Image (cartoon, coloured by chain):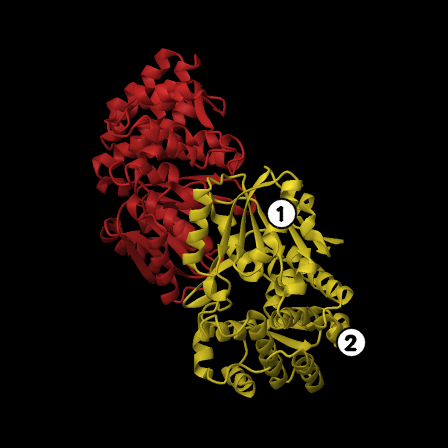
Chain colours: A yellow, B red
């Protein structure tokens, strides 16, 4: 097991990464103010891991008041599903000291985290991510949210967990498609701030996607270390945290434009990163060779490097106009000077964005 | 105009109190990061004051993207109404810098505040309270929430406004019943921590309820000063802030038990304070004379000193069991040693609670 700390003063918390951690109930018990919790999971992950986690928690003296199993998928990250979580918390008479534990991928973490942030104005929260995407990104940093038909993650809160427990063994049951989708966010850290990591990923992509345990655990650790550094420096996205959104403005348009069902988040991020790299190249910043390396690594990983064929450029622009990154009507894009060097700009000409999307459609 | 500060480090904010403040748009403009806002009000207050506030804001350079007018009443402080506010914010393309301004009573402040806390993970928030209850209590301190059928304020967040603008002229149009309901919370400050204020209220009750402008403004100021001190010392209710809940455990049972429609919050708090005082007297703490003074002051103000005749004691206990103040299954009560001296106890025998409720039914 390796442990990192997200350094946020009195809201600092550990991230434990390694095999077999679902059995380590004491890693959760030690951060809770009271020995009781409610588990939130989905109908895919629940049957696989809820029993082991419940047993480990019981062994550490923590009892589960109830387990909420919601349908699987981004399409269910809604206010309606959130309301069903509140109903379950109240039916179980969960009080202010009762923890909410998220067991699942990014959707479960976002949904359960927002429920924890807002149930009785905030109860303790624990992340047990079981997908690569959640282990390297969604579970760290305290962003919680649900979607609105008009935009992804439009309703949410910044709310930090008490601990993140990333059991890399749970990735064994992850479908290949989801493993690839998570890999897109791993690549993102290399692209925005860690050129050495990007190079290693070019070497290790085969081992990671082939589920080599050591390569996987190392990729999770390096990703979390990058994310923890960014979050510690800028918890509420006033500055450099926005760089983590590389490709996300395009990706959110793809996800919203396809109803949150056809594309996985990581797949949309992959296509969105290529669009951002294209735009960066077209305004004369990112060298063509770097653009090619990014596109090639994602393509080799079986990830999409273009958006959905049936989503017109106009629809992207419309959807990006209400994206949260918009300020005063202007869209702020994360662009690249090189691999490992990203920045934010609100000055990108609309023609460049149109051309970048068109080049990747 | 008098100004107080709620001292919360980098989240400190001013409370401006006085006549004519709706016209002082610059008091709001000066705290906003961008000159745009969305107004949330209700169908009663909106027609009275929205035009003046909009004009004052325009004069200070702040434009309103839209105004959301929700139905009037606690019965509408729901997730469904909240969703209609999100819809309006998105339809108006409100971004992260767009402020949400609450113009109305406690329901509007709680609802709009929770919308501001969660829209795009938090946007700037401004309180313009127009009821006595909101001016002396709800608008100060950052508690925001909506109700759930199983309990009041069960879904919410701690989220501080950037400024509170309490125009005491707006109390002129407040119905007598609501003025009295707000007076219950004024009395509460005297009872829990300010015996001198309680004595003054015994002298000034007639002038305040007769809407004497000086007496009203002084009551608002003294109440806000008490609340600001408590909130600054304990923002998230880990300790003394809980004392502000005097009578509220009983009051929430009354409100939930009567469907949030028959009783105003302040009326329920009045009856609940008498129940808490009764319980405090019955366990041998609060002198009988003090109990009588509390009951008499509230009764003279035309406030209820007993709960609804048709709410059985059993139903109170059932509803209080899921109240947020419950911890580990035990209900924590705010009790009194004397006027001006309150404390929290989780050790109150159930018989005492039953007897106190029965004595006030």
Report the residue marked by disc 2. A203
Location of residue B99 by image quarter: bottom left
At 28% from the left and 55% from the top, the residue drawn is: B69
Does residue B249 appear anywhere in the picture? yes
A271 or A68: nearer the viewer: A68
Res. B64 in view: no
Pointers 1 and 2 within a single chain: yes
Indicate the quadrant where residue B40 lies: bottom left
Tell which circle, 1 or 2, labels the residue nearer the N-terminal end: 1
Question: Is B123 on the left or on the right of A216, as rendered?
Answer: left
Chain of the residue displaying label 1: A
Residue on which the image places disc 1: A162
Residue visible at 26% across and 27% down in the picture: B304
> Looking at this view, is B171 or B346 the one in front?
B346
Percent across and percent down for residue B333 are 45, 26
* Side (left or right) of A152 relative to B41: right
Q: Reply above or below: B236 against A101.
A: above
Residue B153 in the image: state x and y as whole percent.
40, 42
Q: Residue visible at 77% across and 75% down?
A: A199
Q: CA distance from mark 1 to mark 2?
A: 35 Å
User: Where residue A57 appears, x then y in whole percent?
Assistant: 63, 44
Label 1: element kind: loop
Image position of A255 with respect to B336: above or below:
below
Position of A3 compared to B81: left or right?
right
């Amino acid at each position: 097991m390796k442990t990192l700390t997200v350094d946020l003063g009195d809201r600092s918390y550990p991230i434990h990464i390694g095999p077999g951690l679902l059995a380590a109930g004491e890693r959760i018990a030690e951060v809770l103010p009271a020995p009781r919790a409610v588990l939130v999971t989905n109908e895919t992950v629940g049957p696989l891991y809820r029993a082991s986690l419940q047993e480990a928690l019981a062994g550490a003296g923590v009892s589960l008041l109830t387990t909420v199993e919601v349908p699987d998928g981004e399409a269910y990250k809604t206010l309606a599903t959130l309301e069903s979580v509140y109903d379950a918390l109240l039916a179980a008479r969960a009080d202010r000291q009762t923890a909410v534990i998220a067991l699942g991928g990014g959707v479960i973490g976002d949904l359960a985290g927002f429920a924890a942030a807002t149930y009785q104005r905030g109860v303790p929260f624990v992340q047990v991510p079981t997908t690569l995407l959640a282990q390297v990104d969604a579970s760290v940093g305290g962003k919680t949210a649900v979607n609105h038909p008009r935009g992804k993650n439009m309703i949410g809160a910044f709310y930090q967990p008490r601990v993140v427990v990333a059991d890399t063994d749970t990735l064994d049951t992850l479908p290949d498609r989801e493993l690839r989708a998570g890999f897109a966010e791993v690549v993102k850290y290399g692209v925005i701030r860690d050129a050495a990591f990007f190079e290693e990923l070019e070497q290790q992509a085969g081992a990671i996607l082939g589920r080599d345990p050591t390569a996987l655990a190392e990729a999770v650790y390096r990703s979390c270390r990058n994310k923890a550094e960014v979050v510690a420096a800028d918890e509420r996205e006033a500055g450099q945290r926005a760089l983590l959104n590389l490709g996300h403005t395009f990706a959110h348009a793809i996800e919203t434009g396809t109803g949150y069902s056809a594309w996985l988040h990581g797949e949309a991020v992959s296509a969105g990163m290529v669009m951002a790299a294209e735009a960066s190249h077209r305004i004369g910043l990112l060298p063509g060779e770097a653009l090619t390396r990014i596109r090639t690594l994602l393509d080799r990983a079986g990830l999409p490097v273009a958006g959905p064929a049936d989503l017109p450029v106009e629809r992207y622009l419309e959807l990006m106009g209400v994206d949260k990154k918009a300020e005063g009507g202007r869209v702020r894009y994360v662009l690249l000077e090189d691999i490992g060097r990203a920045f934010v700009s609100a000055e990108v000409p609309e023609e460049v964005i149109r051309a970048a999307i068109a080049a990747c459609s």
